[in-house]
Amino acid sequence: MAPPAPITALQGVSVTFGGRPLFETIDMAIGRGDRACLVGRNGSGKSTLMKVLAGLIQPDDGVVFVQPGSRIAYLPQEPDYRGCATVQDYVVQGLPADEQDEAHRVDAVLDRLQVAGHRDPLSLSGGESRRTALARTLVGNPDVMLLDEPTNHLDLPTIEWLEEELLSFRGGLLLISHDRAFLNRLAKRTLWLDRGTVRATERGFSEFEAWQAEVFESEEAAAHKLDRKIEGEMKWLREGISARRTRNMGRVRNLMALRGDRAEQIRGGQQAKLAIAEAERGGRLVIEATGIAKGFDSEEGRKTIVSGFSTRILRGDRVGLIGPNGAGKSTLLKMLTGQLEPDEGTVKLGTNLDTAYFDQRREGLDPEDTIRKVLCPFGGDAVMVNGQSRHVAGYIKDFLFDTRQLDSPVKALSGGERNRLLLARLFAKPSNLMILDEPTNDLDMDTLDLLEDVLGDYQGTLLLVSHDRDFLDRLVTSTIALEGDGTASEYAGGYSDYLVQRPAKAAPAVVAAKPKPAAAPAAAKPRGKLSYKDQRELDDLPSRMDKLSAEIAKLETVIGDPDLFSRDPAKFQKTSDQLHGKQAELAAAEERWLELEALREELEAGR
């Protein structure tokens, strides 16, 4: 089937920045029905490329094509409200010039997104500002939408509403987003901006990492014929991906075990009660809330934030808090951590708690300070991390900095680099309780991966408020859901587990969407267990994965010989093929282990 005719396209487009090429001779197109995502490392030029497509930046070379009569709508990361006294003034600019008297269209889309048109746009919260920008993008019924980080600052119901809107959109769509769950659901084609060029695949975003690994492996083989510098770079990139996958599998196994323990605590079984009693004697209790409630008076009357909520959080637990904006997530967080007294009930905090806090506003950095001074404010070159002294040069490499940047001022860093430096400073502070309030807002995907890695290794207790479903699924042992009506319930596992376990009446409302008939609740399933064959396979998989990892390490050692290709091309090719095969076997084994482990949990929980 022939691809759709392009509505907008780039032909041989090049853009330079600061005297160096940002990208060169780019060819790409977006057609009707296209749902593509644009991915790439922080600073690679994704937003700039999207602005070229939107006509906001003129390329240094090449042609930008737009089909005559077509409408292109662009959602920027930061909306420009200059000259707009009200939200309605801003949104109406999304209509074509000859249709801007059709105010009813503006009112309709603002009503769907729950933003008041008379508001001053400069008074909006982050979430309200993002919904206003979305309203301007949607109001003109465009042929192509270019969306740069559309989920930033949105709550989960609004993200889910937006997904439904975009799934039904018949025009072309290009997305930049750090929200993996959002991209997994929407993107059917992937454009990868990498080292100044765009690679394209008809695979969706869910297959991006596998495709990326294939590209790196192919380039590493080719690098043996080129200079050693490129060879070393490719080896570092591919080994980094392999190492991350290995680390992630270990973390997944650990997370599964922790979720099982947390499920027993929530269900309140005898075994859990014994464990909790032992934990309290051993000083493992972090937070115990009993029957807490909180409400506030408003013009509409008394609003209950939470009522009759109880939980026990032990050392090492990772608890996610979810709910619509305004449901009271931050209020509950403050009660659980002793910053706010409940109206009813009690909160008991454990002893010797060292708390690190990362809020939505992000504590600022002095632009004149160097990276060294930010991390070593009292001088010297040592940073204390998890009770161990580390040289600051080695520590910043964990956060994707080059050691040559150690004495660079903060003002010379990109936005993504500043976020990484904030995280490096946060994790350099001794803590055994970490509170993260919307940590993923404004983070690029590289920094998000880094944050996930660091939190995965964190030995303390974690309280996490987030609207990022994939992030929650990968990190938390339990999820506290505030439904917006004063109820709060705790569920074992992440966001996906919450969706399975929640009662039908607790289904989160989707912003301005028409209510759908509730599905009849499924009949309770008896608890069960894996078949003998599946259980045996599950038991055997860890040793099989370890064996494959060892074989891969040996093959990597052989192929890492820089003279192998010139000395014995046949052996090089054979080893390369074997390596690729073993890596594919390992990936398949890892996926099968996850599948069987999830099935085992589901059967044992009686879901």
Image (spheres, rainbow, N blue to C red):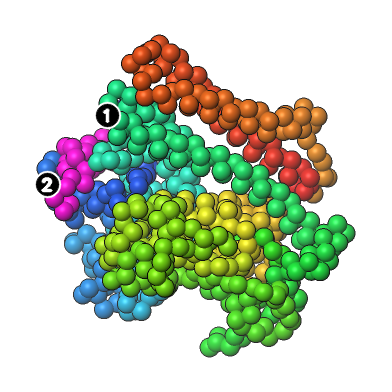
Horizontal relation, residue 357 to residue 87: left or right: right
Q: Residue type at mark 2?
A: Asp
Labelled disc at residue 60: 2
Q: Is residue 204 visible?
A: no
Q: Secondary structure at mark 2?
A: loop
Residue reaching furthest front? 380
Q: Indicate the position of residue 130 as horizontal and vertical percent values.
A: 38, 65
Q: Is residue 67 above or below residue 326?
A: above
Q: Indicate the position of residue 116 as horizontal and vertical percent values.
A: 39, 75
Residue sitting nearer the eye, 34 or 23: 23
Distance from disc 1 to disc 2, alpha carbons, whole Å, reads 30 Å
**What are the residue bounds of the magenta stretch?**
4-33
Q: Is residue 361 visible?
A: yes
Q: Is residue 451 above or below residue 8?
A: below
**Quarter of the figure that contains the N terminus:** top left
Residue sitting nearer the eye, 363 or 226: 226
Residue matched to label 1: 227
Horizontal relation, residue 598 to residue 177: left or right: right
Residue lying at 49% horizontally and 58% vertically, measured from the top left:
390
Q: Is residue 586 above or below residue 506?
A: above
Answer whether residue 236 is magenta in the image. Answer: no
Which comes before the other along the chain, label 1 or label 2?
2
Mark in the foreground, 1 or 2? 1
Q: Secondary structure at mark 1?
A: loop
Answer whether residue 23 is magenta in the image. Answer: yes
